[in-house]
Image (cartoon, grey):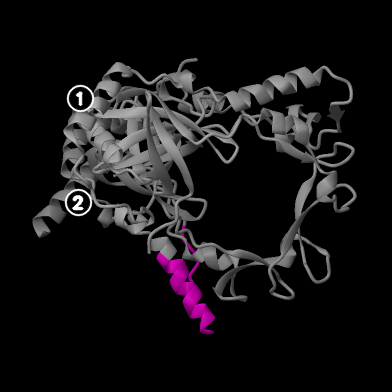
Amino acid sequence: MAARAIWKGQLKVGTTKVPVKLYSAVEDKTVRFHILDDKSKARVKQHMVDPDSGEEVAAEEIQKGYEVEPGKFVILTEEDLEKLAPPASRDIEVVEFVPQDEISQQWYDRPYYLGPDGDEKDYFALVEALNNKKSEGIAHWMMRGKYYAGGLRPVDDYLFLFTLRDAEEVILADQLPKPAGAAPTQKELNMAKQLVEMLQGEFNPKDYKDEYRKRVMEFIERKAKGHAPRLRPVKTKRQAAALDNVLAKSIAALKKEKRAA
Amino acid sequence: MSVPVNLFPAARGGRASLRMLGPDGQPLARRYYAEKTGKDLDADEVVRGYEIKKDKYVVVTDDELERLEPEKTRDINLTQFVPADSIPPLYFERGYFLTPAAGSTKAYRLLAETMEKNGLAGIATFVMRGKEYLVAIFSERGILRAETMRFPDEIRSPDDVGLPKKKEAPAATVRKFEKLITTKSKKQFSPTKLADKQTDDLLKLVKKKEKQRGSVVRVESEADADHKVIDLVQVLKKSLGGKK
């Protein structure tokens, strides 16, 4: 079944406008639970209360505040917030282009597909141009009253728009000191290289499955039928051994595996 | 190969989060209540249920979930190394810095150096808050960073979304876009250009209103430990143990 578009807009590159539809590129499959009242096993509701008195505060009495220092709030009225919202727009403005992979993964937040909305020629021409130039577009847009910045990337034949995190949120490695401790010796570096080479391969996503999700779902299904399996408590493991030993053991184990294969 | 590590988020929270306050400015709390009786429910009066069919739930306890968890360990278990630029960005979810845990400084430095020199990322599984994560580990400036990854079945294909098949684009249109890209190209990404004006404006307004009477409320700050502002960079610096 085809997915529904989340939003419609137009990519603005220079004076050219390419109409697009936005779709989520991911589907969260985490097992979701509802909160139930233990007595009645019915879904619970939520409301806001004054934690001191326990009294409910009605929606129309709730104010929004920005905490400038602990315990000190500046009240922002609905009117204030409305004034702050920039005018609605359907433009995804591409402000510049950078080489692909210039942006660290740390900036990327959520991926979206952009699909053509009507005219397909411009859409596929833009994909081809971005692929040929190995470029990524930097864009910003307003969606449902909120500002977004994003990276516009081609993947194979389609366009992706990744929302980017705010500069204030991202901590980069160059803001941090190098880890303390003695530098590895040449011998250790050689051993580590050997080990890494033995484990080297291509990234093949199909090799990875969420085993935990599978276990939880199987458990739920069995419990629904009335026979919950008994589960053993989990063990906690922690290993700390001399580095030389760990490296030597790992290499030996891998060699054995390879011979057996 | 496994190295014990500590884990810290590589991103701070947003800078413009607002709190919900009561009529007198007191910070409010979100509470669960039973719809029938209207009574508030404490944490020990609620359970977690999976909706197996409409309005029918299977209760799953904390204890059961804990027992379904993979073996608990604070080690990263590296199972494979791949070229660092070969993983599509679609997979990445959230970044965490890894710092050496007690006794692992040497192994940590060795791993970080070897990966960085050879342009490799490590693929590992990692258990965090009772969930098994698939992570890609990158090494930058001697520091390891894990990016949690989505599982492949969580990523939609163009077919899943229902995107149209590729159409041949007119060569002239492709050239037009290529020219546009060339004229607007920069060598480097400069995040300051993306400054979120909406948030900037909100913070400006907050500053202005802070000086106005009637716009500011003060309440006794509840046990400050709950709301202590943690400087993540300072914590990371300490944990890496490097020079200040």
Outermost residue, top direction?
A: B244
Q: Position of residue B21 (x, y in %)?
A: 81, 40
Q: Which residue is mark 1?
A: A186
**Cα–Cα span, label 1 and label 2:** 22 Å
**Vertical placement of residue B168 versus B207, above or below:** below
Q: Position of residue B182 (x, y in %)?
A: 26, 19
Q: Position of residue A24 (x, y in %)?
A: 43, 49
Classify 10 Å Cα crowding around label 1: few (below 14), some (14-19), many (20 and above): few
Residue at image position (29%, 23%) is B181
Outermost residue, left direction?
A: A259
**Residue stretch in magenta:** A214-235
Residue at image position (77%, 67%) is B34
Q: Which residue is mark 2?
A: A253
The tag earlier along the polypeptide, 1 or 2, is: 1
* Viewer-proximal residue among B221 and B240: B221
**Vertical placement of residue A153 versus B183, above or below:** below
User: Can you say which quadrant of the picture contains the C terminus of chain A?
Assistant: bottom left
In magenta segment, residue A233: yes
Task: Report the amino acid beneath label 1.
Answer: Gln
| Element type where label 1 sits in the image | helix
Q: Chain of mark 2?
A: A
| Element type where label 2 sits in the image | helix
* Viewer-proximal residue among B181 and A15: A15
Residue at image position (50%, 73%) is A220
Q: Position of residue A120 (x, y in %)?
A: 30, 44
Task: Report the amino acid beneath label 2.
Answer: Ala
Residue B222 visible in this rendered orientation of the protein: yes
* Viewer-proximal residue among A188 and B42: B42
